[in-house]
Image (tube, rainbow, N blue to C red):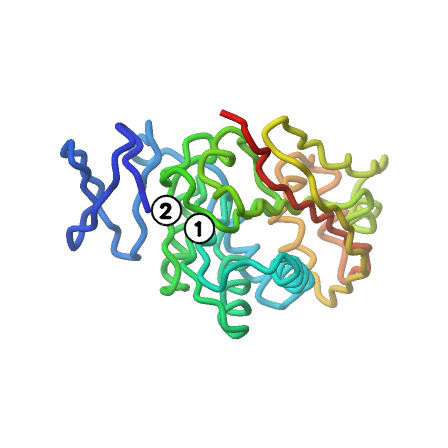
Amino acid sequence: MFVCPKCGLPLNNFERIFKCPNGHCYDISSQGYVNLLLGNKKNAVHGDNKLMVSARRRFLSLGNYAVIIQKLFYIIESFGLNKNLILIDAGCGEGYYTNALTAMLDAAGYNISAYGLDVSKEAVALASKTYKNISFVVGSVNALPFSDNSADILLSVFAPISEKEFFRILKGEGILITVSPSPRHLYGLKEMVYDKVYENPPPKFASPLFNKVEEESVLSDMTLSSPEQVNDLFTMTPYFYKTGAKEQKKLQSISSLTTEIGFVFCVYKKQPYVG
């Protein structure tokens, strides 16, 4: 399933290492994941840091975004896929969505082999430590270390997209599901923090390699009842790192929050006859 990021040949598991026929070796960490990110310098930080990852784990564990899992499950069910599935979550973060969806599909009688990839070593380490039934890997969506035509289901939840790599690893009858924020997702939070508030842009992904076969938005409201929950929500988003001292001070004064949340689900299939 995994391929060598240096030469593209299959990787085989030899106890505590992955090794390709050309002799390239990759250690399996004590948490159980493998780092296949090329150009990964020691102590370099890629993707979400530990603060962001920990905040996301606490926030998602409360079920605040459980509607995403439910909708992903219904989408997969509606396509009548084979019960033996390979699922790859490209941009899996700390593994919440990967694990929850895998558990729901397993309970429905699917035989799932699940893989999660993220560029953040902190996120993958926490995911691998917690969810032992899923194979996690540190890697980039721009150089996915998976074999060609390997995924029945390819997920991209609030994550970057690489159209050529997604096309390469998705099976001909497989589906790509993307999840993006709706225009007014977290609008109430932004109103309390920023002087000028803008709606989120619509999903931009369009490619001659894929057909969009479905698009649907799921809208709701969410209430957070403590300053800790509000802070975790803000910390796990990109807003936190783009916010100045004035806005940070406003955030610290928020003890509870009710805001709109919304998610845009798009489903794509590979275009036939594309080389």
Quadrant housing residue 150: top left
> What x and y, as percent, mark residue 71?
68, 60
Q: Which callout, 2 or 1, points at the residue further toward the start of the chain?
A: 1
- Decide if residue 169 is on the left or right side of residue 60: left
Which residue is painted at 77% across and 48% down in the image? 185
Q: Which amino acid does label 2 sit on?
A: Val
- In front of the other: 20 or 93: 20
Residue at numbered disc 1:
116
Q: Is residue 41 above or below residue 59?
A: above
Asked which secondary structure carries label 2, the reply is strand
Residue at numbered disc 2:
137
> What's the CA distance linking mark 2 and mark 1?
6 Å
Which residue is painted at 69% across and 35% down in the image? 244
Q: What residue type is labelled 1?
A: Gly
Asked which secondary structure carries label 1, the reply is strand
Numbered label attached to residue 196: none
> What x and y, as percent, mark residue 183?
81, 42
Marks 2/1 in contact by CB < 8 Å: the verdict is: yes
Q: Is residue 134 above or below residue 143?
A: below
